């Protein structure tokens, strides 16, 4: 049966890297992958065209798709919008919430060829392979009440950090299962010394642990976890945490691998539908210059093949092709060493396609 893929290029460098992903999808189709690819607008580009960051038509197409591939959203042009509900980021958050994409997988994997691009000493990051499992549809990002209002003659801003037991349990199970498939270690990150919501989080993780006797569960406060990530990152295998802590820790983990331009992500719902996107943002400062690194986006295609389209062989072929290109010494600006020649977005895309074809 033909599976449906929705491509959402978005804003900033989104369209440039999405173009490389589209070429890769075409190469997969030529290799026998039975998919139909559609495109739609989201984020600032959707706001400009329709006055909404998540137009109804885009949401409908997303609901009907087996998998969604998203570039990035946001940019200074829309940061001035006072109405938060019109900001490009709301397009992304709306997709996550409406599709119930609660399970966010953010691998931080160091390609050995890039060890010297890391901000840490090569020996601290050699062989680094962490999976951050971030809860994506709850926590302080979505908790009610929220707002800015007048109290006692001054304005007060407030948000609510809330998790129900069932929300914690469901992301916990994703993380325990992930740990079973990987190194058998799970570190749950919380702030249980201060926040009740994370006392409950810790309790639920403890309650699940006996069901996964092959997984060693540990707990860490988020401030310590941030420190440990830059001190001795290889102590981690799978990390599970809430929406906001996961947002912050996954950027830090990404940088350990040399560049956030290398890391893909998957966001899954209960029926296995997924949205795939690079961990990086829309990088408006370099948009339109053909210099962005398309590898995170191309590796997102690989994750999509693995987690939503049941094509692990094609996924491995893409990942191997990326390795080949790095072996050849090709580097976009973000992963280049001083003095090295910079490959453009399109050159990097060309090279991956060529390596992908050779591995056929
Ligand atoms: C991410 C991003 C988003 C988030 C923004 C763009 C809303 O930083 O995917 O990590 O905070 O979740
Ligand atoms: Mg983020």
Image: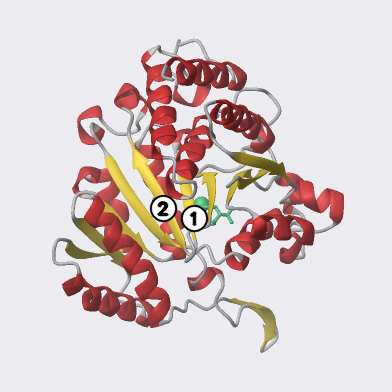
Q: Residue 267: give its label.
A: 1
Farthest-out residue, front: 1
Residue found 41% across the figure and 13% down from its top: 329
Residue at the image position 53 percent from the left and 47 percent from the top:
276
Task: State the residue in front, 295 or 318.
Answer: 318
Res. 123 image quadrant: top left
Q: Quadrant of residue 219?
A: bottom left
Q: Is residue 250 visible?
A: yes
Judging from the image, what secondary structure is the residue with disc 1 in?
strand
Marker disc for residue 105: 2
Marks 1 & 2, CB-CB < 8 Å contact: yes
Picture disc at residue 230: none
In-front residue for pair 341/66: 66
Quadrant observed for ligand 1 in the rendered image: bottom right
Whole-percent x and y of residue 242?
A: 41, 66
Which image quadrant for residue 258? top left
């Amino acid at each position: 049966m033909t599976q449906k893929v929705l491509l959402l290029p978005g804003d900033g460098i989104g369209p440039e890297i999405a173009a490389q992903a589209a070429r890769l999808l075409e190469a997969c189709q030529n290799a026998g992958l039975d998919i139909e690819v559609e495109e739609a607008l989201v984020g600032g580009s959707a706001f400009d065209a329709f006055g909404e960051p998540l137009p109804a038509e885009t949401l409908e197409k997303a609901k009907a798709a087996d998998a969604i591939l998203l570039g990035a959203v946001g940019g200074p042009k829309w940061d001035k919008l006072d109405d938060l509900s019109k900001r490009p980021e709301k397009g992304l958050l709306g997709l996550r919430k409406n599709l119930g994409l609660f399970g966010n997988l953010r691998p931080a994997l160091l390609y050995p060829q890039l060890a010297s691009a890391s901000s840490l000493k090569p020996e601290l990051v050699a062989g680094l392979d962490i999976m951050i499992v971030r809860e994506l549809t709850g926590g302080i990002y979505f908790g009610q009440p929220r707002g800015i209002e007048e109290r006692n003659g001054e304005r007060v801003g407030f948000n609510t950090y809330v998790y129900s037991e069932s929300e914690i349990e469901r992301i916990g199970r994703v993380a325990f299962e992930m740990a079973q498939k990987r190194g058998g270690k799970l570190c749950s990150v919380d702030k249980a010394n201060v926040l009740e919501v994370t006392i409950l989080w810790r309790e639920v993780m403890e309650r699940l642990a006996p069901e996964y006797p092959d997984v060693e569960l540990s707990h860490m406060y988020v401030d310590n976890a941030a420190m440990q990530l830059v001190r001795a990152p290889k102590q981690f295998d799978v990390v599970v945490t809430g929406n906001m802590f996961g947002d912050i820790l996954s950027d830090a983990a990404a940088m350990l691998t040399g560049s956030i331009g290398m890391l893909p992500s998957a966001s899954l719902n209960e029926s296995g539908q997924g949205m795939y996107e690079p961990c990086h943002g829309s990088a408006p400062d370099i948009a339109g210059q053909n210099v962005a690194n398309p590898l995170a986006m191309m590796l997102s295609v690989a994750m999509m093949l693995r987690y939503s389209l049941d094509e692990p062989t094609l996924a491995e072929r893409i990942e191997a092709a990326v390795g080949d290109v790095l072996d050849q010494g090709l580097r976009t600006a973000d992963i280049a060493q001083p003095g090295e020649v910079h490959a453009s977005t399109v050159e990097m895309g060309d090279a991956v396609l060529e390596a992908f074809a050779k591995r056929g």
